[in-house]
Image (tube, grey):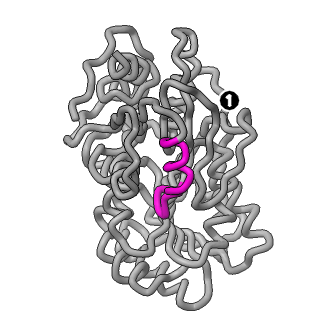
Amino acid sequence: MNAPKSIAKPRLTTSAMIASIASEGQRVRAAPFGKALVELGETRHDIVGLTADLAKYTDLHLFAQAYPDRFFQMGMAEQLLMGAAGGMAKEGFVPFATTYAVFGTRRAYDFVHQVIAEENLNVKICCALPGLTTGYGPSHQATDDLAMMRAIPGMTIVDPCDALDIEQAVPQIAEHNGPVYMRLLRGSVPLVLDEYDYRFELGKAKMLCEGNDVLIISSGFMTMRSLEVAKSLANDKVSVAVMHCPTIKPLDEASILQAVSSLPRLVVIAENHSVIGGLGEAVASTLLRHQVQPAGFQLAGLPDAFLDAGALPTLHDRYGISSETLVARIKNWLN
């Protein structure tokens, strides 16, 4: 799928490695993952933290400071990170292993697949810089991580939207018996879902707002963008519903099928991932298998391509996942 041309307008520049996707003036919470894991560690003494030289950049340094005897720095060796996490899980610990998403999936895939998942070990892999959340180019842009991890049998996959999602997801994935891959937003993370009476439930999609013309099914920070789109399109008398799907696998098929079949409206899947192998294809497969035909169906994800390096606002415009370009795309699909 070809992404739309970028909208010509001045944009603020950012550093290429920026991990926060908060806009200027937006409410944020600092290090929600690290703080949630520290809080959990107070009562769960089986929780251990491991990282591959990236504690500061995954917010795991907070856990290391609080519980130095339960923190393990594995160095730049992601295969070793996953192998050690699997070994600790066999001894009854619940390891939280952190790194960048490209390294935790592409570089360590065989160890995740064979050491952790095949034995259904209780390892929680939490990876920063998912999708297009860095401008460092294809070496650091994990635009295919969901496709890779969805292919692993028994792997639970979580793509949280904001700080609240992360805070509530941490204890639930710790409680879940089996391997989990969670995309991680770190640093100053936007806070948006508290305005929608939202609570994270592992395996459940949640309808955040209702609308009769368009249904956006989204995950990750694209849910934040989708809510912005809904507000913007309301000014043009376009009614948009937003369903947040934080658990990519297992997918909440029942809620999705009910939402799609309830009204004849355009269905848009918005995700910070390639259109190959992510939420969009998971939803499309669900609709096809259950013979549910929406009034229209479009994928608003990243193109099947190696993406450019640069500032995030520019790249999000270029590849169609900024709120402004998503508004333009939906208007075009409705015409």
Dominant secondary structure of the residues highlighted in magenta in the image: helix
Q: Please report the bounds of the magenta region as a residue range.
A: 247-261
Residue found at x 42% / y 30%: 266
Residue found at x 62% / y 73%: 176
Helix, strand or loop at mark 1: loop
Residue found at x 50% / y 44%: 220
User: Which picture quadrant has residue 67?
Assistant: bottom right
Residue 257 forms part of the magenta stretch: yes
Q: Which residue is mark 1?
A: 27
**Quarter of the figure that contains the N terminus:** top left
Q: Nearer the viewer, residue 58 or 169?
A: 169
- Specify the amino acid type for callout 1: Arg
Residue 298 forms part of the magenta stretch: no
Q: Position of residue 203 (x, y in %)?
A: 58, 60
Tell me if I can see residue 86 in this picture: yes
Residue found at x 43% / y 87%: 119
Q: Position of residue 283 (x, y in %)?
A: 40, 50
Tell me if I can see residue 20 in this picture: no
Left or right: where does residue 140 sit relative to residue 40? left
Q: Position of residue 319 (x, y in %)?
A: 30, 29
**Quarter of the figure that contains the C terminus:** top left
Classify 42 as above or below 185: below
